Structures are given as C-alpha cells and as structure tokens.
Image: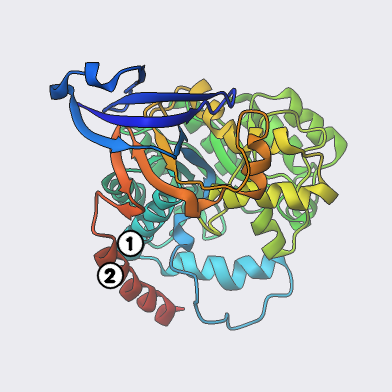
Amino acid sequence: MAILLKNATFVDWQTLDFKSTNILVEEGIDGKIQFVRNSEQVEKNKIKQTIDCTGKMVTKSFAVGHHHVYSALAKGMPAPKKSPENFYEILQYIWWNIDKCLDKEMIEFSAYATAIACAKAGATFAIDHHASPNFIKGSLNVIADAFEKVGVNHLLCYEITDRDGLDKAQQGLDETEDYLKKRQGLVGLHASFTVGDDTLKKAVELARKYDSGLHVHAAEDLYDQTFTLEKYGKRVVERFLEAGVLSLSKTILVHCLHLDALEREFIKKSVCWVVENMESNLNNNVGYFSGKGLGEKIMLGTDGMHSDMLQSAKAAFFVGQRHDIIDYPSSYKRFRNVHHYLNSNGFKGDGDNNLVILDYKTATEINQNNFLGHFIFGLNSNHVNDVISNGKLVVKDRKIMMVDEVAILVEAQKHGKRLWRKL
C-alpha cells in the first residue's frame, strides 16, 4: 500500500532542486518514493491515502543527531537545592539528580513526549543518549517501544558511567549488550571524566563485538579536560583515540568544545562524527562550538533542550557568525549530515519514504537558488503540516495520528509531578 501526494512541490534534500510532481510513497522501513506524472495512472488498489499538497513543499523529513529522552519531564521543575556555580554542579544538582529518580513509567512517558515532539517538528528519526541509574535493565526497550508506537525511528544507547559505582557501570554494559542483540543501537558513555579505563575498554570491545560505535560526550566543559589530564595524563580525545573509540565509523563525539589543535586534527583524520548542540552549550555556559579543524563530519543535535531541528540549525548559524566558521551552505549541511551518518553506517529507518510536508506561505519567491535564505530566516516547525515515517502518515494537519497525544500528555504530567516530588 502507498500514500499518494498530489500536486506537490518536491525539494530534493541534497541538491535543493525543485520539482512539481505527484509522489507515490511506499510503506515499509525500506520503502521508496516514485514520481508520477499523471496520478490517474496509479492503480487505485495501491493507494491507501491521498493528500493534496497544492501550495505545499515536500522534502525529506528531519533527524535529531543527539537527544536526551530523560530530560523530557524537566521543564518547569522546582529549582535545585543548591544553585549551581559551574558545569559540574549543574550535573550534580540537576541532571544526575533527575536521572536517579526515573522509574519505568517516567521513562516511558518521557519517551512518548519526546517522540511526539520530534514528529510534530518534522523529525522521524532520533539518536538518543539515555541515563536512569536506578532503572537500567530494560530501559532502552521501554524507550524504543514508545518511539515506535508514535512512529519515530531511533538509534538508542544507555549512558554507561562509573560515577554510581562499578556495579552500575556493569549493569549499563549488560543493558547495552541485551539491547544490541535485538535492535540497532550504540554503546553509550557519559564522558571521559566519569569513565575509568576498565569500563572504557569494555565499552569499546562491546561496540566492536556488535559492529556498533560509541556515543559519548567529549570536552563539553573544560573540567572534562582538566580531570582527564590529571587522572590519565592525556587529553580527552587522545585518550579516546588510544582506546579505539575514534576508529569506529559509527562513533559520535558530542559537543567537542574544549579541544586543542591536535585533538581537532585527530578527529578530522578519523572516521567518527561530531554533534554540535549550540543551545545547550549556551544554557550551560560552557562555551561556543567551532567546527574549525574538525573536518566535514559535523551534524546537529538538541541535547534534550527540545526536539526542533530547524531551531537548532538557526542557533548554530546565528551564534556561529561570531564563534564559528559557518555560512548558509554549511549550516544546512550540518542539519542534513545526520542522514549521511545513518546511511553510510547502514542504519535502518531513514529511507526515502520519510517525508515532511511544509505549509510555508511566503511573501517572496522560493526556489533552488534562494532556498537556504528561507531555511535560515523563514522556515520553522510551525510550517510542519504532515509527516510521513516509513511510508506511514504519523502527523496529519499538525495532529499526531498513531497515538492519543492528549491522553499521553495528561499521563506524562502526572509522572512529571511524581518526579518533581522525588527531587
């Protein structure tokens, strides 16, 4: 079965070429799209649904390069017991406090809320980095199941760390292996300063065993560098390089702010990828991302701040005007690089039949030559009208189709209040 998009303006996500056409969208995780000149020629029994796209643009849907489901119930939470004075205290008094309080139901509805937010913002794929030290076993399946019910594809990992003891670190390794036996995923690590040599070695071995990669925070704050230098006698990226982290093409290094020139060269020459999270860096006051010397394998994430990749792209561009080497083409390239990461590494769920229909009314002409100007200064998630994931309509007229959004958010608020009481 297929969905027919009639009278569409299709924008090729790679060339930005505009085409007026009808589009037949196949269902399935490996489904294709077909351009049809005359929609009347399509066999009626093949069409499950027809959507009139007159005056709308159709293009490849979006993907989140780095997310945190576990932060979904944090918005509006009570202030921490102590006002953090630095990044380490932000972790200690906010995020490490939250993740320890999470139980199965909180995680489940955090995942539902995150997947719904992704879909409504046009993202049909999310790469997530999860932590719940007091509910580790089975946590990734809880998230995966919720995402799939909403209709959002995923690449998950559990944040392995020694900060809660070696027993918890082993539980994280075990949860990761159990998950990788059945589903695609990554091996998550928190950061160099909370991961000892033995845990790091085991994580790399696990990634190699299952043909995966590492998903790890790298030099987000200067503390990560100073601690690693004092403890291990080397800088963060050098330590990861020697451990084999950078030799895996599926590896994702998140943040990468406080790097010296040699570390940037190590990354540039490696096969791994970097994820920029500009808004989170601003919020945590840890510094400004710069792609200088890192090469071309840079993609964008939200770091759990939200699920809106168009917003993340704008933040990267505007803040980058002073602190980065970024322009219109490179901002769009970073926005779309997540697709190259997924495709080049053989991950499923980001095929051609993942599309977004944009209801973008503009006072000025939009075409291949000026699309990037509209991308930065015009398009936003309010223009996401419909979303197709794996050939299925998951958002129609800005409404979630696969689950009851209202009921889920009511239930999520209940679990949010429980979380806040535990804090």
How would you rate the neighbour count of disc 1 (Cα within 10 Å): few for under 14, some for 14-19, many for 20 or more?
A: many
**Dot label at residue 273:** none
Do the numbered discs 2 and 1 sit on residues whose CB atoms are within 8 Å?
A: yes
State whether residue 84 is above or below residue 323. below
**Among the 4 quarters of the image, the one containing residue 32:** top left
Left or right: residue 160 compared with residue 334: left
**Among the 4 quarters of the image, the one containing residue 408:** bottom left
Q: Amino acid at mark 1?
A: Phe
**Does the rendering let one see residue 365?**
yes
What colouring does the structure picture have? rainbow
State whether residue 384 is above or below residue 411. above
Q: Residue furthest left?
A: 45
Q: Nearer the viewer, residue 207 or 383?
A: 383
Left or right: residue 329 compared with residue 346: right
Q: Nearer the viewer, residue 286 or 241?
A: 286
Left or right: residue 367 compared with residue 120: right
Mark 2 and mark 1: span between their CA atoms? 7 Å
**At x 41% / y 50%, what residue is drawn?**
171
Q: Residue 231 in the image: x percent, y percent?
A: 75, 50
**At x 86% / y 36%, what residue is drawn?**
261
- How many numbered marks does the figure carry? 2
Q: Residue 94 in the image: x percent, y percent?
A: 57, 71
Q: Amino acid at mark 2?
A: Glu
Label 1: state its secondary structure. Answer: helix
Query: Which residue is disc 1 drawn over?
Result: 109
Q: Residue 18 in the image: x percent, y percent?
A: 53, 26
State whether residue 229 is above or below residue 274. below
Q: Residue 248 in the image: x percent, y percent?
A: 58, 26
**Does the rendering let one see residue 276?**
no
Query: Which residue is disc 2 drawn over?
Result: 411
Label 2: state its secondary structure. Answer: helix
